[in-house]
Image (spheres, grey):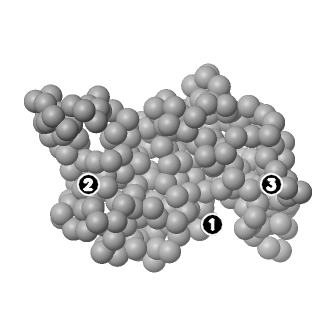
Amino acid sequence: MSLLEVKNLYKSFGGLQAVCDVSFNVQDGMIKALIGPNGAGKTTLFNLISGVLKPDRGEIFFNGLPIHSIPQYKIASYGIARTFQHIRLFPKMTSLENIMIGRHTHTKAGFISCMLSLPFTWKEEKLVREKSMELMKFLGVSELASIDALSLSYGQQRIVELARALACEPKLLLLDEPAAGLNMRETREMGEFISKIREMGITVLLVEHDMSLVMKISDEVLVLSYGQKIAEDNPLSIQKNKEVIRVYLGE
């Protein structure tokens, strides 16, 4: 079953065609990688799926529902969460507090009830904290809970950002270059985390430049070049695809 369907998507910026007639599906329960050289349109495609940008033409369906023309917050409430190419953690907040923010789509307390400190808000806050700590434990970083998020190492910040996205309890997780800036050990661990996330029943679509990571964990790979899809297949077939080798991997 297709969890995500992208149909004939177009997006341009001035005279630059960033995404040109791109169509693909992401099946429920898979890890799908999106690769291509710099400027291929990968992040633009992520921004279209998550609602940061609206397409010029084309359609996007999630769980059978059209999402290409609805607000970003509504898309998140449907069950799509993402991380970013450049880490975006909140300053002057602990790692745990950053992760707790990810659960805002599952809380009912409003501004007034929080100001009045009503009893149900205490219970909700306690549950949010407990669920966030469970995620930190799952990712092996529970000892970082009380530490200021921006004082963490780059690799630790990546994991906290991943935990914050998981706190949204997504059905589809969009990972924009999750291994960017990581060393070999951290990249290997990130691959293990992504595989565990799939085991939780979460579908993953990732943009990544580390080919060893992509080929190891992906079920399918989609290749973009200059905003157009040039290949879509299993990792082994992509490695042997002459057009992919020519435009991306090199002769």
Residue under pointer 2: 97
Q: Nearer the viewer, residue 164 or 247?
A: 164
Q: Which circle, 2 or 1, is nearer the viewer?
A: 2
The residue at the far top in this view is 64
Amino acid type shown at disc 3: Phe
Residue in view at x 74 percent, y 40 percent: 55
Q: Which circle, 3 or 1, is nearer the viewer?
A: 3
Residue in view at x 80 percent, y 40 percent: 56
Percent x, y of residue 126: 15, 40
Residue in view at x 19 percent, y 45 percent: 129
Horizontal side of residue 159 vs 88, given as left or right:
left
Q: Mark 3 Cα within 10 Å, few/some/many (few <14, many 20+)?
A: few
Q: Is residue 171 above or below residue 229?
A: above
Residue under pointer 1: 209
User: Are the residues flagged by discs 2 and 1 in contact, CB closer than 8 Å?
Assistant: no
Amino acid type shown at disc 2: Glu
Residue under pointer 3: 13
Quarter of the view holding residue 60: top right
The answer for how far apart the CA atoms under marks 2 and 3 are is 36 Å
Q: Quadrant of the N terminus?
A: top right
Q: Is residue 51 above or below residue 155?
A: above
Q: Earlier in the sequence, mark 2 or mark 1?
A: 2
Q: Secondary structure at mark 2?
A: helix
The answer for how far apart the CA atoms under marks 2 and 1 are is 30 Å
The residue at the far right in this view is 15
Q: Taking the image as drawn, is residue 240 in sight?
A: no
Q: Earlier in the sequence, mark 3 or mark 1?
A: 3
